[in-house]
Every structure is written in C-alpha cells, then in structure tokens.
Image: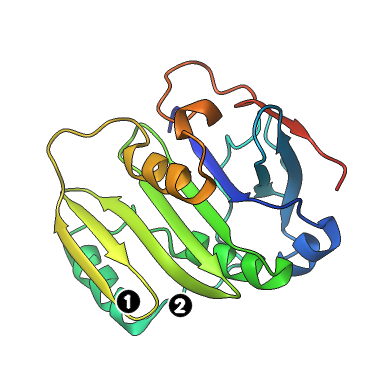
Amino acid sequence: MGYLISGHFVRQRPDAARVRAALPMSIGFTLYEHLAHPVFAIDTYRATKPSQYPFSAATPATDIPLDVSPELSAVYEQLRSESAANGLKRSYINLSRALSSAMSQDVLSVYSDDDGNDFACLSRGGEVLSGIARCEAYVVSFGPSHASRAPASSQSRLHELSSGAVTSFLGVAASDLGFGSFDPPDSLGFKVTDA
C-alpha cells in the first residue's frame, strides 16, 4: 500500500466541531491547509493510531456504514462475485456523505495508492454527486442514482482517476498537491491548521 493518499478535500476552511460531529469516536482526524493553494483537507485515521505523515493511513471502516445506493450495490455485488470489489470504497462514500452534510460544503474523498486502488467520491449535502473507482480490470462510475462499470485501460498512471477528480473539483493541478508522484509523501504541501 505504498504511495497511499487517503483524505477528504474541501475548498473552505473546515470547522473542527462539525468534523468531530460527523465522525464516530473511533476515528481521529487532523485538519490541514495547503501552503500554496486555497485547499483544505481532513486526514482521518484510527483514533488510537494517528498516522506519522498526513494522508498516509487508511480510515478504518469498523464504525462506518457500508450501505450505498441500490444501483451501486448491484455493481458492487457483481464485482464481489468476481473478487474485484476492493477498489470500491463504500466506507469512504459514506464518510464523504457524512462530512459534506455536517460541514455544509462539498467534500471530495480520495483513496489511491500504487497497489491498484484509485478511488474518488464527491458529495454535497449528504448526497453523492459523483464517484469513480478502479476495480481490477474495471472502472466504476457512479452518481446519485446510477452506477456502471466499463473495462479499464491496461495502462494507468499512479493516482490517475483520483488526480482527475481532484483537479476538476479544486481547480488546482493534482500534481501540485503530490498526486501522481513517487516522491516520499511526507506532507504533500499541507500544514496543520487550528480550525
């Protein structure tokens, strides 16, 4: 799971109390502000084990609902029967929804690494707007009431799908935030903010 980027990106400074209200107590968080761009981020992780570097730990799914729309659930079950569902991060979908509802702003949740995971979900007001995930030989696209899968390109770049979602949502080149780089992901240009 090298070169993992796991986090939730927003365009306005997040309020710590609202973030805390959206998360189960088993999940800790740290708020970040980018040093060069108007971008804020929420790093989530196991509350008892903060990550050494920002955005470098998977968020545990233990206390997060895994229910998704019927359309996406049907695609998930098809993928699961083919042992290809791991890339569809249902817990991150629900984290994105909960954070967007609590903070009253759009949230882009990302989970991407060099082991084949490349996932992004954009939510607003507690509802999914759009999402994309690489699931083995497929790319899954989904929205509020649709989900589909298509064959993935045999050639893919590190963080390719999530980079496209980050660039589109934030209006900042994802590479400026450390996506797609094989450099050590020590801070990705972010600093802790005391929001």
Residue at 73%, 39% (x, y): give it.
32
User: Do tag 2 and tag 1 residues touch (Cβ < 8 Å)?
Assistant: yes
Could you say which is closer to the camera, residue 74 or residue 132? 132
Where residue 67 is drawn, which disc sits there? Answer: 2
Where residue 73 is drawn, which disc sits there? Answer: 1
In whole angstroms, how far apart are the C-alphas of marks 2 and 1? Answer: 8 Å
Residue at 76%, 50% (x, y): give it.
13
Specify the amino acid type for callout 1: Ser
Q: Secondary structure at mark 1?
A: helix
Question: How many residues crowd mark 2 within 10 Å: few (<14), some (14–19), many (20+)?
Answer: few
Residue at 49%, 51% (x, y): give it.
169
- Residue 143 coordinates in the image, percent (x, y): 36, 71
Residue at 71%, 41% (x, y): give it.
49
Position of 40 relative to 183 (above/below): below
- Residue 191 coordinates in the image, percent (x, y): 75, 30
**Quadrant hosting residue 75:** bottom left
Specify the amino acid type for callout 2: Asp
**Which mark is first along the chain, 1 or 2?**
2
Question: How many residues crowd mark 1 within 10 Å: few (<14), some (14–19), many (20+)?
Answer: some
